[in-house]
Image (cartoon, rainbow, N blue to C red):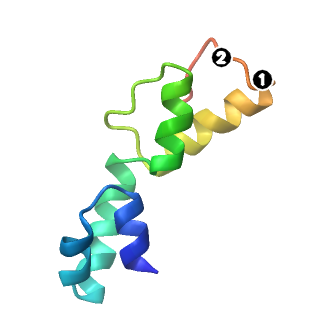
Amino acid sequence: GQVSFLIELGMERKHALSLTKTQAKGAIDDRREKYCTRKQAKILKKYNIPIAGIGVERASRIIDAIAANGWKPVQEIPL
């Protein structure tokens, strides 16, 4: 649920558990724009793409571009 997704986005478990559902939703919305998931970060790092400031949706677009390129580095990183 929300707690596990917040943890996946890098929030400490203790903090995630202390949030109300409304607070958790706000935190998820905020973090989705600023952070990718740990799994996405691992893939991006493998291709030497800095993850700072890359949110979930952008990370997804970048990974999709890499996949479409046969899992080889892309010349231009999608915005």
The residue shown at (47%, 39%) is: 41
SS at mark 2 in the image: loop
Q: Which residue is mark 1?
A: 69
Q: Which mark is residue 5?
A: none
Q: Residues under labels 2 and 1: Cα distance?
A: 7 Å
Left or right, 49 with respect to 60, comes to left
| Residue 49 horizontal side relative to residue 9, left or right | right
- Nearest the viewer among 42 and 33 is 42
Left or right of 66 on screen, residue 24: left
As shown in the figure, which amino acid type bears the numbered disc 1? Answer: Asn
Quadrant of the rendered structure where residue 9 is? bottom left
Vertical order, 25 against 6 (above or below): below
- Residue 31 picture location, percent across and down: 32, 57
Q: Secondary structure at mark 1?
A: loop
The reply to whether discs 2 and 1 touch (Cβ–Cβ < 8 Å) is yes
From the top left corner, tell me how far across and down residue 48 is, in percent.
49, 19
Q: Is residue 60 above or below residue 21?
A: above
- Residue 79 can be seen in this image: no
Residue 1 visible from this viewpoint: yes
Q: Residue at 39%, 56% (x, y): give it.
A: 32
Q: Residue at x 55, y 22 (%)?
A: 77
> Quick check: 7 left or right of 22?
right
Badge 2 crowding class, 10 Å Cα cut-off, few under 14, some 14 to 19, many 20 or more, is some
Type of amino acid at the residue the image marks with label 2: Pro
Q: Where in the figure is residue 63, as x and y percent of width and height?
A: 63, 36
Name which residue lies at 63% across and 11% down: 75
Give the image location of residue 72, x and y in percent. Answer: 72, 18
Question: What residue occupies the far top of the structure in this picture?
Answer: 75
- The residue where tag 2 is placed is 73
